[in-house]
Image (cartoon, rainbow, N blue to C red):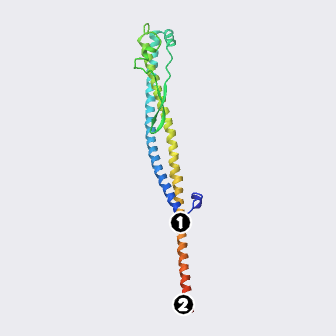
Amino acid sequence: MQRAVIAGVKPTRLELIRLSRRELIASKGRDILQEKLDALVIEHARLSKELEDMAVTIRNQMQGACEALQLAGIMTGWARLEELALSCVKIPEPAVSSSQVMGVRVPELKMPDMPGHGHFRSQRGYSISGTSGQVDEAAMRFESVIESLIVYASLEGKMDRISFEMNRTRRRVNALEHLVIPRLVRTMRYIEIRLEEREREDLFRRKRMKQNMERKERIEGLDK
């Protein structure tokens, strides 16, 4: 048992009280961490499902965008379409920020000028005149693909951070559950056993002293 207890612990009642408080705090901490872990597992599952749905959406969007691009090339001419592509402005960089999910700080990606806001379309860099509607259709579809990819990347970053925190929290719960708390309990049991042994020794010593005193009194009584 001594190998499983905390080293250097004195078998006293004061130490027993102190360890009892530590065990109570460790148990409460384990329960709080377990609740956090359960919430993280639920959030991880939700993000995983959302990523699966987004992957399907992106595939469908990409297929539609490629079909629109093929039609635009046929209607406008591939040489003209290449000229229009070269005249387009650079895609704006996504804005990187952070937010908190279940108390965990996660990355957040956003596109500055998303389609449908009335800005992205006017900033493509080519003139609307002299182009077919198929070019605009292809451009809008690829803009939607970019938007979805940014959302997907943001979700993936969140899930990776949640997964990291989930594994770390699980290790802390396991450490408390299987190492810290059992060792505290074994140490308290060890102290209780030592205290019981000490009480039995004291009781036996008091009985021996009482017997010796009674024997001494009887001998003194006989001498008189």
Q: Earlier in the sequence, mark 1 or mark 2?
A: 1
Label 1's element? helix
Residue 127 picture location, percent across and down = 45, 9
| Quadrant of the image containing the C terminus | bottom right
Q: Residues within 10 Å of mark 1 (few under 14, many from 20)?
A: few
Q: Report the front residue among 41 and 89.
A: 89
Local SS, label 2: helix
Q: Is residue 178 above or below residue 201?
A: above
Residue 193, horizontal then vertical, whole percent: 53, 66
- 10 or 169: nearer the eye? 10
Q: How far apart are marks 1 and 2 (CA)?
A: 42 Å
Q: Mark 1 points at which residue?
A: 193
Amino acid type at image mark 1 = Ile
Q: Which residue sits at x=55%, y=82%?
A: 213
**Tag 2: residue type?**
Gly
Q: Which mark is residue 221?
A: 2
